[in-house]
Image (cartoon, rainbow, N blue to C red):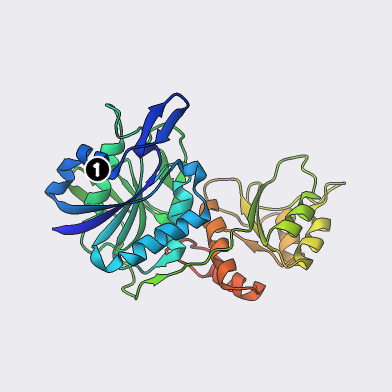
Amino acid sequence: MKKILLVLTGGTIASVETEEGLRPGISSKELLDYMSEIADFCQIETLELLNVDSTNIQPEHWLMIVRAIEANFQQYDGFVVAHGTDTMAYTAAALSYLIQNPNKPVVITGSQKPLVMTITDARKNLRDSFRFACEEDVSGVFLVFNGEVILGTRARKIRSKSYNAFDSINYPILAFIDNDRVIKYVDIRGTGGKPTFYHRLIPKVFLLKLIPGMRPDILDYIGVTYDAVVIESYGAGGLPFADERNFFEKLDNLLKRECVVVIATQVMLEGSDLRLYEVGAKAMSRYRLLQAYDMTIESTVTKLMWLLGKYQDFQSISKGFYEPVAHDILRCD
């Protein structure tokens, strides 16, 4: 029987009702009392690490989770992290960069309804997560939700209330969980390499969503305050350069400050391709820019935080950005 560590961080799954709305409040013992049937197929131990709404999760908390998993890595066959759904995709992506080649499963899950409610998805998601964590030949960071197994670097929350809250972006669903059956569609055995844990992030990354009418002088502020900016452009990607709202003029100042600029797209599926239109091709030919291609925004942002913690020069960051980690990027030509 496999031994799995449940790491509790709070979130809806551990929430109780208060006069001010749902708030994390149940203990690990209370949680396990609701899930006694899991003990039929695995041994569970718990670690109460945090008890916060995931809106309050910050990069420092990701590092806390990593340290907890590393400290207990040799004692367990796998890990389940109970987490709030609102920032779960960011945490899944961040852990994918901070824990590489783990040679055992690190599963992140949560729920849209608290475990203490009569009607809830929490019991299914927890049971599915432990079932998957007990699978043979499974290695990596995963998000398990509503019976689906999603790669940590490819998850996104697409619904705010429904049970099928998450989807895999630009990558297949890895497996489906049907009660005690795990139906795998993708090889998820891992590389077999030695696990590597990272403990440094630089969170000075700004995410800028373009809208018509935005003034380009916002880039002046970003360049002074942040080390990297991800610009969510339109469609296949590009930057406005017509009339008085010419973003090209401000890119010069931004890049002179050694700020790393990544062009992504607001469109959820299929990714960016800046060569397709003049607004993208001109920007790429004139300036030292990166583009996200098929990466999720969550992975793009957290990968930059990780790379800024490793490197100080653009060349190393650029090379590292395009090197695939946990299948986070498929196209980078």
Q: Where is residue 58 in the image (x, y as percent from the top left)?
A: 52, 51
Q: In which quarter of the image is the N terminus?
A: bottom left
Can residue 323 be seen here? The reply is yes
Q: As drawn, is 6 to the left or to the right of 286?
A: left
Q: Position of residue 28 (x, y in %)?
A: 28, 44
Q: In which quarter of the image is residue 326?
A: bottom left
**Picture layout, residue 314 above or below residue 18:** below
Mark 1 lies on residue? 29
Q: As drawn, is 269 to the left or to the right of 175?
A: right
Question: Which residue is drawn at the image coordinates 64% and 73% (left, top)?
Answer: 312
Q: Which residue lies furthest to the right in this view?
A: 244
Q: Position of residue 228 (x, y in %)?
A: 66, 60
Q: Residues within 10 Å of mark 1 (few under 14, many from 20)?
A: few
SS under mark 1: helix
Disc 1 marks a residue whose amino acid type is Lys
Q: Quadrant of the C terminus?
A: bottom right
Q: Position of residue 85 (x, y in %)?
A: 43, 42
Q: In which quarter of the image is residue 101?
A: bottom left
How many numbered marks, from 0 up?
1
Question: Which residue is drawn at the image coordinates 53% and 62% (left, top)?
Answer: 303
Front one among 38 and 161: 38
Front one among 219 and 69: 69
